[in-house]
């Protein structure tokens, strides 16, 4: 059997990323060996390396139950195990959002968050910080039967009183389908709210994260899916069934949660599964093909997408074909075009983003380092020029030179007093900036809004509270942007002054934009209102509970945005001040060396030639460092632009 295009490309991407990490790590070690790695530079490189090592590729599978999501995951990713890894049978097998990933620091296991946690306000993301709140099930990867039994626990259900289901936001008395599900005052619900499977599959080891959703109704009842997991997925596979086609629920979910996120994005694909249900021995191949094509066109038209985005497949027959090495059945199941689209659409796009971000960071670090080395060369050259001019001069000339350098040093020290005053003002301005982005203040605001929502029985009360919340959050981000501009202007003026007075290199403080934070807050606000507008004026108990759950998830996400903003601002402030500090430090060092050189020559004129020779050797050493820096940059470029070469993979 030929190689699996998606798997091969993902492995190639991981290999490319590994070589890039190696190249950047080599640059970091060299800078450290050469004593060119200040705290700011080291922090930037380490941050880049950590991001590359933690790089994930998130693929979400979304569908109503009985569409074959789990079987499709088995067919695409786990066929090499020669059996079903995820349970797949008639009816609902995935009862809660399930993430498949691998973290080597944790044991092979399934972690299950009890459904009872939905009664409180804490989000799933928050619970991930507290492992003791989860039920852990060991995963024996040596036994296929044991693994299947462990995976089946994800789909466990139980019967609870209707009032308890309401408390969890899983029963809505206004929904006729919910009422029909009640038996003797009880209703069946999932045992678990969320599942995380830590599994050492080769692709999961390399950073793939698979999200299996429990059906379209969960998208409305679990805010974490709507606001976090789906919007942050690099690819979403929306699965329909060839026998049922596109339902009204499918259209609503596509428009509200998946299709609208396209906006030029890649990786939003529709899978028309179970085409084997259209295979008919009483029809010709051409007639069967025409029926499948008709379903593809109809699905594309109803969802408002191109037919090239719809992939008709049979996940079940594709899995059987892969397990039995049946090339004919596999071809008939049409998995290959879908896998090809994922690999050609998703992975190169992901690589492009990582490459651009990494290249910018590497170039900035190299540019900064080259600036330091060139400043050192300028200082050495200045000393060489001064000392060369002293050849054959008398003692008076040397004393005059000594006085001149001493005067420069005194002048620079007066400038240093201004620099220290600037640092004090900079610190004050920084405190004001962090005040606008204070996480503690945000949490207090969330507590106040929560109290207002608890007391609201009308939708207008909730709307007013939420609008005030978003308005306050955006206002603080706007004020932080104004403060950033003020700091930037102050630093630009100081850089200019030091350049004019002391000959330091002209540096423009790096820009900083708060636009991405505003955009994320706007996305959350839009999601809340789209969800909220489905409710009437009077809120039922279950609607109120669900609305509050959405608020808690939004609030958690806003806190995360603020935390990211704080880290970004902290890094920017260091980047603003670091070039000034580096230049001041280098200039001080050069002045001290010049003064020491002339003092030594003043005391013993025969050391002049020795000192000139010593400086020439230092200059040669700096030239060598510049050459070696260029070599490291070239190697980084080679790693960045190395084409991915998928290796051929053959069936076992």
Image (tube, rainbow, N blue to C red):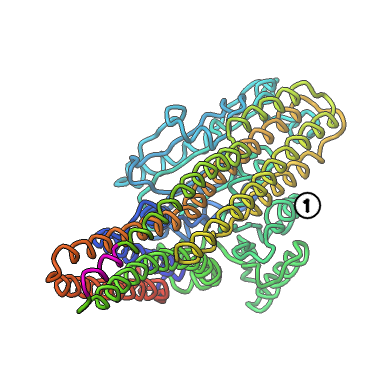
Please report the bounds of the magenta region as a residue range. 394-402
Q: Residue 302: x and y, percent? A: 78, 62
Dominant secondary structure of the magenta stretch? helix
How many marks the image carries: the answer is 1
Query: For residue 638, what is the image quadrant?
Result: bottom left
Q: Does the magenta-highlighted stretch encompass residue 577?
A: no
Q: Could one spot residue 318 in this view of the protein?
A: no
Left or right of 320 on screen, residue 171: right
Residue 644: image location, x then y, percent: 41, 74
- Residue located 68% across and 57% down the image: 261
Q: Where is residue 173 in the image (x, y as percent from the top left)?
A: 78, 28
Q: Is residue 446 left or right of residue 25?
A: right
Camera-side residue of 41 and 528 = 41
Per the image, label 1 sits on a secondary structure element best described as helix
Quarter of the image where one finds residue 560? top right
For mark 1, what is the residue?
A: 248
Asked if residue 396 shows in the view, the reply is yes
Q: Position of residue 430 (x, y in %)?
A: 55, 42
At 39% from the left and 48% from the top, the residue drawn is 102
The crowding category of the residue bearing disc 1, from other C-alpha atoms within 10 Å (few below 14, some 14 to 19, many at least 20), is few
* Residue at position x 54%, y 56% in the image: 494
At 54% from the left edge and 37% from the top edge, which residue is drawn?
125
Quarter of the image where one finds residue 299: bottom right
Q: Is residue 349 above or below residue 38?
A: below
Quadrant in which the C terminus appears:
bottom left
């Amino acid at each position: 059997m030929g190689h699996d295009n998606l798997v091969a490309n993902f492995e190639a991407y991981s290999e490319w990323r590994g070589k890039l990490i190696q190249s950047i790590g080599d640059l970091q070690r060299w800078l450290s060996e050469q004593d060119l790695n200040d705290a700011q530079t080291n922090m930037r490189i380490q941050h880049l390396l950590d991001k590359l090592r933690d790089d994930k590729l998130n693929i979400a599978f979304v569908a109503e139950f009985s569409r074959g999501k789990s079987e499709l995951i088995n067919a695409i990713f786990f066929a090499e195990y020669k059996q079903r890894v995820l349970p797949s049978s008639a009816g609902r097998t995935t009862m809660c959002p399930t993430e498949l990933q691998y973290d080597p620091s944790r044991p092979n296991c399934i972690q299950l968050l009890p459904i009872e946690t939905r009664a409180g306000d804490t989000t799933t993301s928050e619970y991930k910080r507290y492992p003791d709140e989860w039920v852990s099930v060991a995963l024996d990867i040596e036994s296929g039967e044991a693994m299947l039994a462990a995976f089946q626990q994800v789909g466990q259900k139980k019967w609870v009183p209707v009032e308890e289901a309401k408390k969890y936001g899983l029963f809505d008395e206004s929904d006729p389908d919910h009422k029909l599900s009640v038996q003797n005052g009880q209703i069946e619900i999932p045992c678990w709210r969320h599942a995380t499977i830590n599994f050492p599959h080769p692709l999961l080891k390399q950073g793939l994260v698979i999200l299996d959703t429990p059906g379209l109704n969960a998208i409305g009842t679990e805010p974490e899916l709507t606001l976090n997991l789906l919007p942050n997925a690099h690819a979403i596979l929306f699965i329909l069934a060839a026998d049922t086609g596109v339902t009204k629920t499918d259209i609503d979910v596509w428009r509200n949660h998946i299709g609208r996120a396209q906006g030029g994005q890649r990786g939003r694909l529709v899978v028309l599964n179970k085409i084997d249900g259209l295979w008919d021995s009483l029809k010709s191949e051409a007639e069967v093909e025409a029926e499948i094509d008709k379903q593809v066109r109809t699905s594309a038209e109803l969802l408002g997408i191109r037919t090239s985005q719809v992939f008709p497949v049979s996940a079940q027959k594709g899995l059987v074909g892969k397990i039995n090495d049946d090339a004919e059945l596999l071809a008939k199941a049409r998995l290959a075009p879908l896998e090809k689209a994922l690999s050609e659409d998703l992975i190169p796009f992901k690589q492009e983003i990582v490459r651009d971000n990494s290249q910018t960071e590497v170039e900035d670090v190299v540019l900064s380092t080259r600036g330091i080395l060139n400043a050192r060369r300028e200082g050495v050259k200045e000393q060489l020029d001064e000392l060369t001019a002293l050849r054959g001069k008398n003692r008076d000339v040397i004393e005059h030179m000594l006085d001149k350098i001493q005067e420069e040093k005194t002048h620079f020290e007066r400038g240093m007093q201004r620099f220290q005053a600037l640092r004090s003002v900079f610190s004050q301005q920084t405190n004001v900036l962090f005040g606008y982005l204070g996480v503690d203040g945000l949490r207090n605001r969330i507590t106040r809004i929560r109290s207002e929502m608890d007391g609201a029985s009308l939708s207008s009360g909730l709307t007013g509270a939420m609008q005030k919340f978003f308005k306050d959050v955006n206002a603080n981000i706007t004020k932080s942007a104004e403060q950033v501009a003020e700091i930037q202007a102050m630093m630009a003026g100081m850089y200019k002054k030091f350049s004019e007075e002391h000959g330091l290199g002209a540096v423009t403080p790096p820009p900083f934009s708060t636009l991405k934070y505003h955009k994320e807050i706007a996305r959350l606000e839009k999601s809340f209102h789209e969800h909220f507008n489905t409710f009437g004026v009077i809120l039922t108990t279950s609607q109120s509970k669900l609305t509050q759950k959405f608020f808690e998830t939004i609030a958690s996400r806003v806190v995360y945005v603020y935390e990211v903003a704080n880290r970004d601002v902290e890094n920017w402030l260091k980047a603003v001040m670091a070039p000034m500090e580096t230049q001041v430090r280098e200039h001080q060092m050069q002045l001290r060396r010049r003064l020491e050189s002339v003092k030594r020559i003043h005391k013993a004129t025969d050391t002049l030639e020795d000192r000139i020779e010593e400086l020439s050797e230092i200059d040669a050493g700096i030239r060598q460092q510049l050459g070696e820096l260029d070599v490291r940059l070239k190697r980084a470029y080679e790693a960045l632009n190395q084409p991915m070469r998928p290796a051929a993979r053959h069936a076992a």
